Amino acid sequence: MSEVKKIATRESYGNALKELGAEHENLVVLDADLAAATKTGIFKKAFPERHFDCGIAEANMVCVAAGMSTMGLVPFVSTFAMFAAGRAFEQVRNTVGYPRCNVKIGATHGGISVGEDGASHQCCEDFALMRAIPGMTVISPSDDVEARAAVKAAYAYEGPVYLRFGRLAVPVFHDEGSFHFEIGKGEQLTEGSDIAIVATGLMVNEAIEAARQLSDAGIHARVINIATIKPIDEDIILAAAKDCGKIITCEEHSVIGGLGEAVCSLLSEKCPTPVRRIGVNDTFGHSGPAAALLGQFGLSAEHIAETAREMVK
Amino acid sequence: MTKAEKKALSITACKVRKGIIESTHAAKAGHPGGSLSSADLFTYLYFKEMRIDPKNPRDPARDRFVLSKGHTAPGLYAALAERGYFPVEDLLTLRKIDSYLQGHPNMNTVPGVDMSTGSLGQGVSAAAGMALAAKSKKEDVNVYTLLGDGEIEEGQVWEAFMLSAHYKLDNLCVIIDLNGLQIDGATKDVMNSAPVDEKMKAFGFAVTTIDGHNLDEIEQAFSAFHAEKGKPTCILMNTHKGKGVSFMTDSVDWHGKAPNDAEYEQAMAELNAAQKEMEAQADE
């Protein structure tokens, strides 16, 4: 097998900002002393006069961005997911969400794959928090190609958007040439009607790998990539439920309030279907190498395949 | 300012105060105390200081005002209505179901409101963002924001102050209404933030302390703001909560309570008498 290219989606974020910045004068970037880690430093290097470091003060930064948006600028606000969605939740809710400010929140270091920094920095609650805000669009891209496309789509969209990126380098499986991204549209990646695996973020690649393992055992899994967690693509999920009758959801997020519960809410009202949620099981993370942590927390192709086999037999 | 101008502004401030009493009385709720302490400032801002056009409330070139102490919306609404942004009669719909005059300012429903506020400490950051954006775009826009002295207990305001000085936002004018009272009592007893002037100086602001009910002093403070280069301005205004209505003045009870019918009658009688007195003054 040829070596798969791996890129962290935070890197994609920084690169996409730089590309967009060259085209659009009104794009500005705010960071809270993490430009090297969030990769907005890539934009800063190219456009220093449009990059505003706000210091370690995320609550203020989010509202500064809201003010800037009312002046015709399109601010991308960046920090770790823990601080964007967590610390600044109420600022995002009241000063970005409620007034529908055209602010894009580029949150990096989402999920357990933050690794060695441990629980204080491993945000597994951001989907839940951001989904609960009326009118908030929540996007969690799966690889470099999708992440860059999502940043561009977020810029083009008028209104608040929360984008979640990862720290860990992950395989690039989308084909740049043929890929098209649309906010709110899911993507079917494999054919199959024995079971559907609905995944987001870096778990999409694990789902594809799980489907490969399952197909060796004669189980045909339909893998669906849900990059836009809100508004969720109801049609693609309902079709999968009808065709497959069983669903597994996979996310690098708490099983509470994220993709899994969004899918369950939809299905319980429109097409009751057995669902198993793979995610972080209402627990905090801890320090360790990202790959080892993902395995330990069951966020792996092996665990997805095992769950699928249990459901299908 | 000429004597005639001052007289006209004083009369307008009186009408703004009446709007506060009428709207909170009709709503049977709202925050008259802090609205009244800032009534002279609202009047000066919208009738003299800011470059605005009520017929074109979204003009990109306009000056901006952010009411960071959003609960004093009745004061802002009364000034906006007097200035012609919307009909004065609409003040009576304050806080009513389906009214566009929400309990706290909503920039998407109220003409003239530049930022939705209500959660204390956030408006000042948005104002700093506006000032920073104007600087970044090289636009000649001044941004004004009003905070309460209770509000500055929120840590976020100090983050905003730091950023404002760091980015040398000399187009930002932060006004703090030092009426000395907050919900639970006197500010010095609840959470003493004094000395505010020294703190603001230490945070890199050009600080002026004035009597917030004296129009000449308000004018001088804004002149100093326009002359200041390279740093943001802070106007500390000493005021009386409930100013203009005898039984509300300096009373913590009137932070968030509406006048009943009898109180309403008395308040309006006092304000009408004050207005009559002002109107009787010579123009020159």
Image: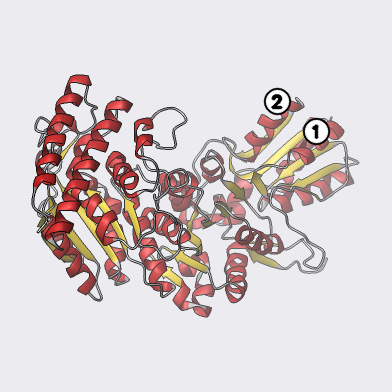
- From the image, which quarter does the C terminus of chain B lie in? bottom left
Pick the front one: B280 or A82: B280
Q: Which residue is mark 2?
A: A268
Asked if A3 appears above or below A252 in the picture, the reply is below
- Whether residue B38 is visible to the viewer of this picture, yes or no, is no
Chain letter of mark 1 equals: A
Query: Where is residue A33 shown, x and y percent of the image?
Result: 40, 66
Q: Secondary structure at mark 1?
A: helix
Q: Secondary structure at mark 2?
A: helix
Three-letter code, disc 2: Ser
The residue carrying pointer 2 sits among few (fewer than 14), some (14 to 19) or many (20 or more) residues within 10 Å by Cα, namely few
Residue at image point 59% right, 67% down: A11
- Whether residue B107 is visible to the viewer of this picture, yes or no, is yes
Q: Which residue is mark 1?
A: A241
Pick the front one: A73 or B8: B8
Asked if B215 appears above or below B79 in the picture, the reply is below
Three-letter code, disc 1: Ala
Left or right of B140: which side holds B11?
A: left
Query: Where is residue B176 shown, x and y percent of the image?
Result: 20, 53
Query: Where is residue A219 shown, x and y percent of the image?
Result: 88, 40
Pick the front one: B245 or B231: B245
| Picture quadrant where residue A196 is located | top right
Q: How many numbered circles does the render carry?
A: 2
Q: Which mark is residue B124?
A: none
Asked if B62 appears above or below A194 in the picture, the reply is below
Report, in whole angstroms, how far the alpha carbon at label 1 lies from the one at label 2.
Answer: 11 Å
The residue carrying pointer 1 sits among few (fewer than 14), some (14 to 19) or many (20 or more) residues within 10 Å by Cα, namely many
